[in-house]
Image: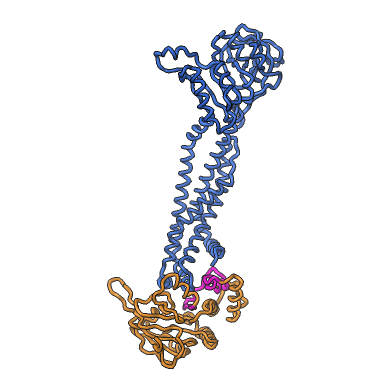
Chain colours: A orange, B blue
Amino acid sequence: MAGAGLPGQGAEPVIRLREIHKQYDAGESEVHALRGVSLSIAQGEYAAIMGPSGSGKSTLMHIVGLLDVPTSGDYFLAGEEVSDMTGWSLARVRNKRIGFIFQAYNLLPRASILRNVELPMMYAGVSRAQRRERASALLARLGLGDRLKHVPSQLSGGQRQRVAIARALANNPAIVLADEPTGNLDSRTGEEILEIFDDLNRQGHTIILVTHDHAVASRAHRTITLVDGQVVKAQAA
Amino acid sequence: MTLLESVVDGVTDIRAHKGRTALQAVGVILGVASVVTVLALVDAGRRKSLEFMDTIGGLRKVLVVNEPARETTRTARQLANVGLTFDDAAALRGLPMVTQVDPIANERLLVRRGDYQKEMHIDGVTPDYQAIYRFYPGRGRFVSSDDLLHATRVVVLGDTAAREIFGSEEPLGRTLFIGDVGMTVVGVMQRKEYLFNNGTFNALEWMNRKVIVPLTTVHKRFTGDPERRVAFINAMIDKAENIPKAKAEIEALVRRRHYGEKDFAVWDRASRLEQQQQQSQQLHIVFLAAGAVSLLVGGIVIMNILLASFQERVREVGVRKALGANGLHITAQFLVESVLVTLLGGAAGLALGTGFARAVSGMLDQPAVITPSMALIGFITSVSVGIFFGLYPAVKAARLSPVQALRCE
């Protein structure tokens, strides 16, 4: 499989998709959401996935994020074949390799933000003391060091998204996957969040951002555009 | 994720939904309360009857009674037998497991003393009577083996009988007439009391009415019975576990003495107590069934509420799965919640049941005690309900596909 990635990349990419298809049963008709998607994303890259609604970008993100499994095709994540994994193995890989950031933050509403950030480490079996230390450090790094005991409803939207970013980074994942991370924020706060992404990327994190907003996508080094379940453009910005 | 952390999460959830939790717990509270009440009352009742049995001689007592053949035409052998006699009792003394034997003859005779005159039951007994009934003289003495040997004209009175016959006079040393025989009062028994009904009813008053004479005196002076017949024979067995064996030996011995005829019966208290308890068990089963129904309903309520609150938690399950929770983490989270609710309900039910049992046990004159084993039963029951009825929603949550769960609004 060597050489299947994009030209100019020597090392094994973090994500390598080959001929990914996804079909759904939608009542009587069958929806073909992805029709043979192949792409590679290198370690340290900052990529945006764009496309109109119904183009399959959400499905692609779910498959990349291991929330869904492809109907056919191969998926290598950090060198590991994950396309035919199920249940428990998927949960483990999701936990260690992927950090999710959602449009609606999806924080646990009744838990403190410290506990929210600790959650992925809890599922990973990290000891209590280590968890606490790392979660506090992450939140401090994102400017929330003085609110560890707050619950999400006590924070603004931008602050909540920063908690979500801290949570995504908790297990030091191979990729950070953000789905419309600025969709619920005003433009100034959105800008702040995007600056954090720039920062994270500079520090070496691989970031994949799903958006329909060109301005947001332009921050990435590379844009992958999907139409009708196929990659029409995979270009460096 | 450790169990402790699941519990912490569960407690957070429960505290956030107090109303929902209370609703879920009600069924379990009532169920456990009713089960615990029944257990406590059964236990109190059992202790009450054991205590009662103990005051009149305990459970090691075996009774040999006459039970003549029912046939209208009797065989010569049956006719030849005269029933239980003093000599049968003497023979029983030889059995190794029998510690005390007391044959009793019962006669209804006129008792006179001055103006007082009344037909009374007279018991002819032996010295072992005291130990067998745990009934001892308060003043004076009891029938002695010397009295038995010489068929002396002495009488021992129960406390009530003494008062009735002698009023305020001191009965010791006085004479009264039984039939035509003048008898000297040598002893007055201690009072026997076992109060029921808040002290208004003495179940042992019949013992205080006793008029007791040596058994041989009955035969020699009152009835003139050369066969020395007795109404029944009490035998004390050395150990409770020997009772079945001793019963068999007694039966074999008496049967041999009665030329193979079984014209008597051997009863023991332990099996009678058991019969009695089996009867009252039917009542307990009704209560326990009510408890079981409450627990079932409580369990179904818990399951329904878990399922109803499911929708609002689907998204949370999706998020947790996206963060790396596996099926076991999710199952544990849901199960911990239902088990916590039922444990809470179980504890409240235990408290409520204790209250119920206390209230009802007033009628028994016996404090109902919740023993650790009852508490354990209550807790095990409630946790089982929690696990059983929490399992379906928990597994259902664990099986959710993360994509579908996250899409749920």
Q: Which residue occupies the foreground of this view, B280 or A189?
A: B280
Query: Count the marks: how many?
Result: 0
Q: Residue at x 62, y 16 (%)?
A: B211
B291 over A198 or under it: above or below: above
Is residue B183 something one can see in this rendering? yes
Q: Residue A106 magenta-drawn?
A: yes
Q: Residue at x 52, y 61 (%)?
A: B17
Rendered location of residue A118, percent (x, y): 56, 72
Q: Going by the picture, which residue comes out furthest to the left?
A: A28
A233 over A158 or under it: above or below: below
Rendered location of residue B365, percent (x, y): 60, 35
Res. A48 image quadrant: bottom left
Left or right side of A166 for B169: right
B18 over A219 or under it: above or below: above
Is residue A153 something one can see in this rendering? no
Rendered location of residue A220, percent (x, y): 47, 89
A97 over B174 or under it: above or below: below
Rendered location of residue A105, percent (x, y): 49, 76
Q: State which quarter of the image contains the C terminus of chain B.
A: bottom left
Q: Residue at x 64, y 19 (%)?
A: B127
Res. B174 image quadrant: top right
Specify the segment rendered in magenta: A97-125
Q: Residue B140 magenta-drawn?
A: no
Left or right side of B170 for B387: left
